Amino acid sequence: MSDYYLFHDSAKCIGCMSCEVHCKENKRLPPGPRLCRIETIGPKWVGNIPKVDFVFMPCYHCDRPWCVAACPTGAMQKRTGDGIVFVDHNLCVGCKACMRACPWGAPQWDPEKGKAVKCDYCLDRVDQGLEPACVAKCVTKCLHFGKPEEVVDARRMRHARAMAAMATEVTLRQPVNGPKAKPMKPKRKQAQDPVEGS
Amino acid sequence: MSKPTCLVFQTYNRLAELIDSGVLTHPRVKRRAEDLLDLLKDVCTGSSGPNHLQAILKSVATILIEEPEAFSGEIKRIVGEPLESHQEVFVSHIETHNCPTGDCDFLTPAPCQMACPAGIDVASYVGLIGEGRYAEAVEIIRRDNPFPWVCGLVCTHPCEFVCVRGRIDSPIAIMNLKAFAAERAVSERTYKNPPKAEDLGFKVAVVGAGPAGLTAAYYLALKGYRVTVIEALAQAGGMMMVGIPRYRLPREVIDREVAFIEELGVTFRFNTRLGRDTTIDQLRSEGFQAFFLSLGAHAAMDLGIKGEKDFPQVIDAISFLRHVSKGERHIPGKTAAVIGGGNVAIDAARSLIRLGCEDVLLLYRRTRSEMPANEEEVKQAEEEGVRLSFLTIPVEVLGADGKVTGLRCLRARLAEPDEKGRRRPVPVEGSDYVIELDAVISAIGQRIDPEGLDSVTDLHWTKWGTLIADTITSATSAEDIFSGGDLVTGPATVVEAIGAGKRAVEGIDRYLRGLPQPKMPPVPSRRMRAALSEVPAQTKMALRRPEMPFLGPERRRITFQQVELGYDEATARQEAKRCLRCDICKRCGKCVKICREQMGIDALQFGHVDFGTPGLTDFRITAERCILCGACAANCPTRAMTLEDREGERVLSLCGTVLCREKLETCHRCGAVVGPARYLEYVKKRTSAVQEAFAGSLLCEKCIRQLTAQSKSGITIP
Ligand SMILES: Cc1cc2nc3c(=O)[nH]c(=O)nc-3n(C[C@H](O)[C@H](O)[C@H](O)COP(=O)(O)OP(=O)(O)OC[C@H]3O[C@@H](n4cnc5c(N)ncnc54)[C@H](O)[C@@H]3O)c2cc1C
Ligand code: SF4
Ligand code: SF4
Ligand code: SF4
Ligand code: SF4
C-alpha cells in the first residue's frame, strides 16, 4: 500500500468518466490505455428498480505489488517514501509481464511508446502538492485523495471472498495485498469461503 | 569519432521537442507546428510522396507569414533554416527513401544496395524472386540498371562481398538470381519497358554503344529525350559484345536487352566513328544539344619487350577477343602463351582453348594469391586445360622468318610488401629460360585511345589519359559534353559503366532544363518495401547457397556454348529465401540487447548484427528460450521484428523468419487471448514469492477487472 488512499464514493458517482478523460489528458495517452476506469455494473433489477453501479478502478498501489515482482527490468518500482508504484519508462522494454501479473488489470499498454503505463497517482502532481488528475476534475466530487485512515485488512479480505464468490471458477488464495477501496453498498450477498466454493 | 547526423531527422526531433516543451502556447500555432511535424515524419519514415517538399515549404511559409514572431522565429530557426541551406537532403529523402546516415530507421539501406555501383534495390528484388514475382523483380532492377540479364551473368557483384548473410555462411547469390529473374521474364514475355515520358523535343547524342552509353540512352529516352547513339562498330554492346567472350555472355542476351532500348525509339548510327566519320561540331549543327561520351578503353598496353612489334603472332588480348567475337575463328598458333593475371587474360586463354589451341600457357609475374582474376574462373580455366605459370617475367619474343618461335622469360621472387602491402616481383639473376611457342597474347591492361576525341577541344585529361568529368554530374569541361564509363574511370566494370550512364542522365537532364546541379553525390533509391516471405528458422539456417551448375569441361573445351547453366526455379526461390532482408532489419542490435541484458533471457543469437555480439547466428535457438513477451518487437525501430497472434498461436518473426511460435491460452470466462503457456509460467514464477493471485482458472485482464468491480459493487450479477 502507499501512504495515500484514493477513495471513490460510488453512491455519488454518475458514471460521467471525467476521471478517465482527465487521467488520459494529463498523461497524454493515445487511444487504448485507460489508467483508471469506471466499470459499470448492471443494470440489474433489484425488486422492480433497475440499478446501475459504478466502480472506480485505479491501481491499488499494493503493499507487495505483483507487477513489481514480475517486472524483469526494474522499470516497475515502488517509491520508497510514499509507496507509490510507478513505471520508469527509461527502463521499461514492453514485455507486459506487469500487465499479466497484476490481479486487477491495472497496468495498461501504450501502443505508441510500446511500453507499460499505469496509474501512479499522478506522482508529479502529488509532489507539487496537487491531487491526482482524476480527483481534481471529478464532476460530482466523489473521488477523494489523501492519507488513509487505518488499513482495514478485513475489508480486503472481504473483497477477496466476494470476488471468489462472483466467479466460482476463480480461486483467490489469501489476497493479502488486495485493494483498499471500500465497497460502498453494504447489502452484499453472503460471501463463501473460496476454498469451499471451488 | 561521431558519425554524421541526418539533418532531416535532427529537424524532426527539434520540432518535436519544441512542441513538447509547450512553448507554442497559441493553439493555432501549435496545430500548424504539429501538421508540419507530421509532414517531416513522413519524410523520415519513407511515407513521403512527390508533393511533400512543396507541402513542407508551404507550411513553413504560412507560419512565418501569419504567426507572431515569437513563435515563427523558432520554427524558422529549427525548420526554415536547414530547409534553406540543405534542401537537397530533404529532397533526397523524399525521392530515394534512403537515409545514408542510418538515423532515419525506416530508411536505412541494405549494404548490398549501397555496394552496388548502379544502386540496385537488391533486397527488394530478391524478396520478389522468393515470392515467384519475376517480372516485378526485373522491373525493380531496371529502375537502376537496364541490363539485368547481362549483369546477372557477368557482373563483378561487389554486393555479394558485403552481403550480411556471408557472415553466417555464404553470401546470397545476388547475381545469379538476377540472371534467373531476367531469363524467366524474357522467356515468359513479361520483361517490359516502363512507360515513356512525353517527348521533350531535345536531341541528345550518345557516342559509344557500350553499357555506359546504352544506359544513358535508355534513361534519357524514358525521360522523353530524342536519343541517337553513334557507334564505331557494326553492333551495339561495346566491350560486352567484343570483349567478354560469348561462353560467359551469349550474344542473344545482349541483343535482347539492347532491343528493349531500341524499342524506346533510340536510333543507332553504326559504323560511324567519332573523329573520322563525324565530329561533335557536325553533330551540334545537326541540332544535338547535349553529348554523352562513352568511348570506353579499347587500346591495349604494350609489353615493352624486345620483339613485341616484330611478329604478327604477338597480339594484344583486346584485339584478339574482338576478332574472335566478330567471327574470326582461327588460332594464332598451336601453342600460345597469354601474359597477364587478370580477367582479360583468363578470357583470352579460355578462348584460345575453345578455338583449338593445343597448349595454352598463362604467364603471371606474381603468385596465384595475387592474381586479380576471379578465382572461380581461374579454376574453370584450369579444368579446361589452361596451364598456369607463376613468378614468370617475359623479357623477349623470339622468332625467325617473321614467325614467333619462343618467349624468353625470367624467374621471379616476391619482394617484401611495400607500404601499400603489394609485393613486387623481382627477377632472379641468370634464371633465363625459353618457352617454345607459336603465339603470344598480351593482356596486361587497357588504356584509353584518345584518337576520336582529338578534334574536341575544351576537354581535360588526367595524367593517366582518362577524361576528366565531374563525379556527381558527369559534366566535362565542355559545357554540353558529359562523359562516363571506362573513358573516365579507366578500364573498370560493366556495372560501374551502367552506374555512370545513369548518373549522367541526371546531369544532362538538369543541364538541358536549366536546373541547378546537385552538390551531393546521389544515393541509391529504395524502390519498395517488398513483402517478407515466411520461412521457419530451421529452414532459414539449413538452406545453403546452391552451386551453379556448369557445362562439363569436356564440352567447354570445344565450344563457345554458355558455361553457366543457370538455376532452376525451385533453387532460385529457395536461395532468395535465404536473404536476411537487410533493407528492413538495420542490424542495430536493440532486440538482442534487450532480450539479453534487460529481460535476462538471451533468446536471440544474432551474431550477424553489428553491435558487439560476436559469435554465431542461430535463429533456431530462439524457440528454445523465448517466452514470447514481445519486448524485442516492441523496441525494434524498423518493425523487422514482429509479434503476432494468429490462428490460435503467438508468432515471433524476424523479417519473415519464424523464430518462435506457441499455442495461445485463452480466458476461461470470455475466450479472449491471454498468452502462451510459457509466458504465463514466466510471470507466475516471478510473482510466486508475492502471493499467487489466481489459481485454477485462467482469466483475461478484462474479466479480472470486471469481476473485481462486481465484487466491489453492491449489486451482484450471478
Ligand atoms: C575481355 C574483357 C572482359 C571483361 N569482362 C568483364 C566482366 O566479366 N564483368 C564486368 O563487369 N566487366 C568486364 N569487362 C569490363 C567491361 O566490359 C567494361 O568496363 C565496360 O564495357 C565499359 O563500358 P563503357 O560503356 O564505358 O565502354 P565500352 O563497353 O568499351 O564501349 C565503348 C563503345 O564505344 C565505341 N567507340 C569507341 N571509340 C569510338 C568512336 N571514336 N566513335 C564511336 N564509337 C566509339 C566502341 O566501339 C564501344 O562500342 C571486361 C572487359 C574486357 C576487355
Ligand atoms: S494493483 Fe496491480 S498494478 Fe497496482 S501495485 Fe498492485 S499489482 Fe501493481
Ligand atoms: S512491460 Fe515494462 S514495466 Fe511491465 S514488466 Fe515489462 S519491463 Fe516491467
Ligand atoms: S542478406 Fe539479403 S539484404 Fe542482406 S546484404 Fe545479403 S542480399 Fe542484401
Ligand atoms: S530486428 Fe533487432 S537488429 Fe533488426 S532492426 Fe529490429 S531491433 Fe534492430
Image (cartoon, coloured by chain):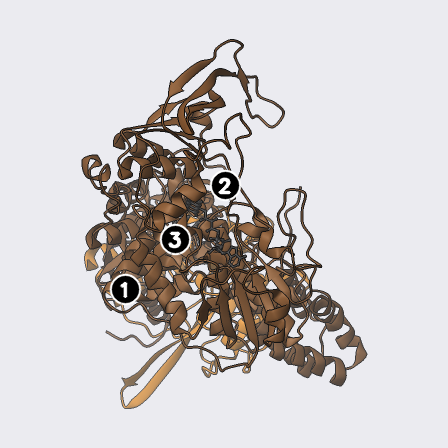
**Chain letter tied to orange:** A
Q: Which chain is brown?
A: B
> Label 2, label 3: how many angstroms apart (C-alpha)?
45 Å
Q: To which residue does mark 3 refer?
A: B241
Classify B207 as above or below B102: below
Rendered-image quadrant of the C terminus of chain B: bottom left
Q: Image check: B17 left or right of B326?
A: right
Confirm whether residue B257 shows in the render. Answer: yes
Between marks 3 and 1, how big is the CA–CA gap? 19 Å
- Are the residues under marks 2 and 3 on the same chain? yes
Q: Position of residue A21 (x, y in %)?
A: 52, 77
Q: Is mark 2 within 8 Å of ligand 5?
A: yes
Q: Which of pointers 3 and 1 lies earlier in the amino acid sequence?
A: 1
Give the class, few, some or many, for how many residues have Cα within 10 Å of label 1's Cα (few <14, many ≥20): some
In percent of width and height, residue B672 lies at 27, 66
Question: Which residue is the site of mark 2?
Answer: B611
Residue sitting farthest toward the right: B69
